[in-house]
Image: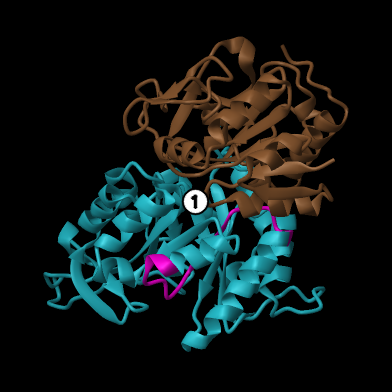
Chain colours: A brown, B cyan
Amino acid sequence: MTLAIVDYGAGNLRSVAKAFDYIDQKCIITSSSDELKSCSGIVLPGVGAFREAAGKLKEAKLWETLRIEAEKGKALFGICLGMQLLFDESSEFGQTDGLGLIEGKVDNINTGGQPIKIPHIGWNNLCFNKKSALYDGIENGTYVYFVHSFSAKTEDENVTAYTDYGINTVASVERKNVLGTQFHPEKSGVKGLRILKNFCDMVKHDNFTCN
Amino acid sequence: MLAKRIIPCLDIDNGRVVKGTNFIHLQDVGDPTAIAKEYNEQGADEIVFLDITASSDGRGTLLDVIERTASEVFLPVTVGGGIRTTEDIKEILRVGADKVSINSAAVKDETLVARAADMFGSQCIVVAIDVKRVPSKPDYNGVFPPDFCTDINDFHVVIHGGRQDTGINAVEWAKKVEKLGAGEILLTSMDTDGVKKGFDLEITKIIADAVSIPVIASGGCGCLEDFADVFNKTDASAALAASLFHFGIISVPQVKQFLKSKEIPVR
């Protein structure tokens, strides 16, 4: 089984690859549509701005491939900005369309009027909302590492975990074979590695039971 | 709830950790990767590498250290020291660092922070601000003690390890780097650094209140209470320490446990 990490010029894709290497999961870093088609599962990493990332994915002619592969049932795991790209649209630097694989949109972190720091940087707890194989062996309340200024707004049924940052903030989503985490599992120590391992197992056993 | 972060900082010279360490069980106490792994196991929330290599040919060694660390330590790693151009930043991020910390170069070329934030995203641009009290008025005895600051303008930004006073108001500078696109501020007080009598709570509070990005407090912690103070009395998001941890005076788990007992959220 091989995972493909989508290379569209995002900064942290090597970190993601190193984490998979560490847990002995074979992965390739690629910008080839053919390789996205032939791999067992796709990881969409990302840091930076939504609009630029969407533009680069389109430029590299990967946008449609991602949508088609996900719609055909291939596992697609978005991390941070990669998760945000799964939604219909984002308001970061103007309205931009997302992949539209999970209903919802991406907007400024809504702090409910509380004076809190933006970006949301650091370790925050997972509050499970819905059972997912992604969190096998992970306890409710586990700390994971976040870095983001925008957050997803979606139906509660798509959310597998929230985190409390003044108000409930979406920490992870899942819709059939498409899933994503707002936090960085590749930067969340041993717990994060376990989450990545769980994703590998989900791909291996085609275990996408959420929704 | 977001946890307050505890961040050990390693000074690196030609690829080796220079300040003494107390990790006697490590085979190579000078190896940054081995020490970063140890801190990871102790529960450190991030690691900062501060490169103090004087020669420019030490750069390759530093990149090698970052790459090795990023392959074995799955925590956020910030690298600072001698970063002058977006090309420097690109190299450091490419080998696996998550953030870079820019200090003197940000003061000398204000466009650097904006360009870097634009290219790599604010989330990976930390601006390090070294601040020093420069009293403009004498105290009652007619002298200028460093802790007698009556005016907000008395907190100056200093560069080159504190050797050069820029005369820039530190609070204004903090607001400016936020506007330029910095994602975090690493604030070090040159008055308290190394003294081990606590963080400079006054300037930390003023700056943490003045900006909406996270502020990392640095310089001066000497005991467990100092960590509790900086989180209880200021809005700092994280606290950084170097020798305190390296010499084993206090360990990361001790800090975490103490803060927990004071009901300060930690991981």
Quadrant of the frame with the N terminus of chain B: top right
Instruction: Give how far across and how far down residue A188 sits, in percent.
Output: 67, 45
Residue that numbered label 1 is attached to:
B238
Identity of the residue furthest to the right in this view = A205
Residues B17 and B4: in front is B17
Does the segment drawn in magenta span residue A16?
Answer: no
Residue B146, quarter of picture: bottom left
Q: Residues within 10 Å of mark 1 (few under 14, many from 20)?
A: many
Instruction: Give left or right: position of A207 versus B97.
Output: right
Q: As displayed, is residue A181 above or below residue A48?
A: above
Quadrant housing the C terminus of chain B: top right
Question: Which region shows up in magenta?
Answer: B72-87
- Residue at 30% x, 66% y: name it: B106
Asked whether the viewer can see residue B254, the reply is no
Using the image, name the chain to which the residue with label 1 belongs. B
Vertical arrangement, residue A121 with respect to residue B153, above or below: above
Q: How many marks?
A: 1
Taking the image as shown, residue B231 lies to the left or right of residue B243, namely: left
Q: Amino acid at mark 1?
A: Ala
Q: Position of residue B226 (x, y in %)?
A: 50, 57
Residue A30 in sight in this render: yes
Residue A151 x, y percent position in the rendering: 47, 28
> Which residue: 51% across, 38% down?
A57
| Residue drawn at the location 45% of the way across and 65% of the way down | B89
Front one among A201 and A123: A201
Where residue B16 appears, x then y in whole percent?
63, 81
Q: Secondary structure at mark 1?
A: strand
Q: Is residue B137 above or below residue B253?
A: below
Between residues A24 and B255, which one lies in front from this camera angle?
A24
User: Can residue B74 be found in the magenta stretch?
Assistant: yes
